[in-house]
Image: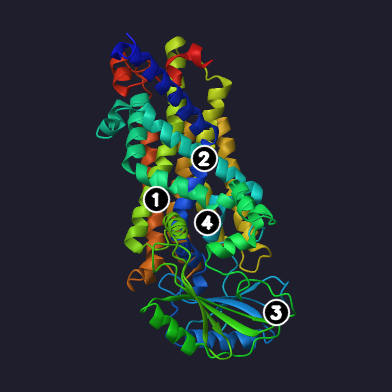
Amino acid sequence: MIGSPTARQPEQEGFRQAMSWLHTWSGLILGWLLFAIFVTGTLSFFKNEFNLWMRPELHGLPASDSDVAQRAQEALHEHAPGVSHFIMRLPDARTPTVNVLWRDLPDSRFQTLLLHPQTGAALQARETAGGEFFYRFHFELRTAHKGRWTIQGRWVVGAATLLMFIALLTGVVTHRRIFKDFFTFRPRKGGQRAWLDAHNVSGVLVLPFYLMITFSGLMIFHALYMPAGIAAAYPGAKAADSQSYFSELQGDTPGARSARRGSKVPSEPLPLLDLAPMLTQAAELWQGGRVGSITVRSDSLGPLVEITRHDGDRLQYGPARLRFDGITGQLQTRLDPRSPAIKTYGVLYGLHLGRFADTGLRWVLFGFGVMGSLMIASGLILWSVKRRAQALRRTPAAPLPFGERLVASFNIGLMGGLPLAIAAYLLANRLLPLEMPGRPDAELSCFFGIWILALLLGLIRPSRQGWALVLGLAALAYLLLPLVNALTTSTHLGISLPALDWSWAGMDLSFAATGLMLAALTRHLLRHKPLAAARHAAPAKSERKRNGARTPGDNTAQEA
């Protein structure tokens, strides 16, 4: 009878089977890229700490005081008397230096200057891509230190993010008892059952975080992926290049002076400005809120000063700004858009970046990112384990088909090799000559070179021994990092731990902990005895029924 449970069941199972197929292949097609995006994005939560650790010459800087901005401005004018535009990022608990970007001509490239927070003296530190590399690779696949961002890289990341969003939604549909399965983790069973449990647990534990991080990642570059709406609302503009749209999004009004917009007239050198009254007024208006950066430029109306609130003061990204006349110090514009659409956009943007988080919450977000990486990795490994079990069931001791061997090799090289490549990148920061030309790009060459080498190892040994070799090398590299750091710098644990300098000691301790975990995993791989072919066989009918739906691998003929 139409509408009866027996009539609805085939339709429900057919829909779930379709979602299972979509879940499997949307995760597999760009799964390795998603894994790299998730890992580097997770490391980006500690981008500032990586930037600091990879410049050990900045160790031991004192805390700044209230006059830091004025001293830094005076030091900048001594260094570059003709400066006409500068952006000064003030020190905070995570970045102790004054970071100044400046230029003397409107069309010239910005140059960087690091200043001492108390004396204003210029600081010399090694050239490095630092933690910025993880951040840039995460959303645009950057492979060079000073290369311009590429639209192609952002399109590829966007496509991978969309597939992950689809995989998350279809995964919820496919596993109708996934929340019950979350409380069932049986690693001792081994094989397909253990990997499926691991995939379920890591997928459900922080599912809201995965949905938020993928959706917000797509939303951040909405102008790139969906420019038609902007073109329709702002006719005559070049879609995603519409300055009117982005000005409105940031709270600007048409025709207003902006410290960020280029001038159409030759810029005059900036005079020394009295920044103290403006900073005092900003602190009063923000009720003690921190100042994040100061932007000053010269145009036909004279100097314009824009003071931006620290982006860690609130969840919404797109910090409040104040614009002052540089000569009179008079407040001209107060920018803090509060429309529902802009606030929603800013909150989602802020959630994705996590800059509002304190140390404890950053570690929580880091843990969520690690769980996401494990979810992707366990899904890819589960695909291989499942098909290997099916092959053993049909023909015991049969060699891996080409496609399955390729996936197994990529799992080892691209997923197991990524931690090894990251460790090589960090070791290169300590071991490469300080005066080496193009040093940041040499660090990146070490990263990608070791990653390619790991892929070659995976292609040669797509087996448990291949995993043990790659992860064992990664464990050794991470355990060497604190030792190499102690031999090459004065920022080692013997100094940072007694001083309770956790911003430096925490990095070495994290590297050591990572090395120990990878060593334990390598030891498990080497000691583990291969399971019999029967143990690799597909789960019993009762277990397949318990999962609630067949997966694409349950019917090889249908999948083919």
Which residue is labeled 2 in the image? 162
Q: Look at discs 3 and 4 and give the one toward the viewer.
A: 3
Residue 518 appears in view: no
User: N-terminal of the two: label 3 or label 4?
Assistant: 3
Given the image, on which type of amino acid does mark 2 rest? Leu
Quarter occupied by residue 248: bottom right
Disc nearest the viewer among 4 and 1: 4
Q: How is the image coloured?
A: rainbow
Q: Please state, as top left, top right, bottom left or bottom right, where the N terminus lies in the image.
A: top left
Residue picked out by circle 3: 104
Q: Can residue 491 be seen in the rendering of this structure?
A: yes
**Residue matched to label 1:** 514
Mark 3 residue crowding within 10 angstroms, few (<14) / some (14–19) / many (20+) = many
Lateral position of residue 531 relative to residue 414, left or right: left
Task: Give the number of the disc on residue 135.
Answer: 4
**Gap between marks 3 and 2, in whole Å?**
42 Å
Going by the numbered disc 4, the residue's amino acid type is Tyr
Of 426 and 93, nearer the camera is 93
Q: Quadrant of the C terminus?
A: top right
Q: Earlier in the sequence, mark 3 or mark 2?
A: 3
In the visual, does 371 lie left or right of 143?
A: left
Q: Please, what is the three-letter code of the amino acid marked with disc 3? A: Asp
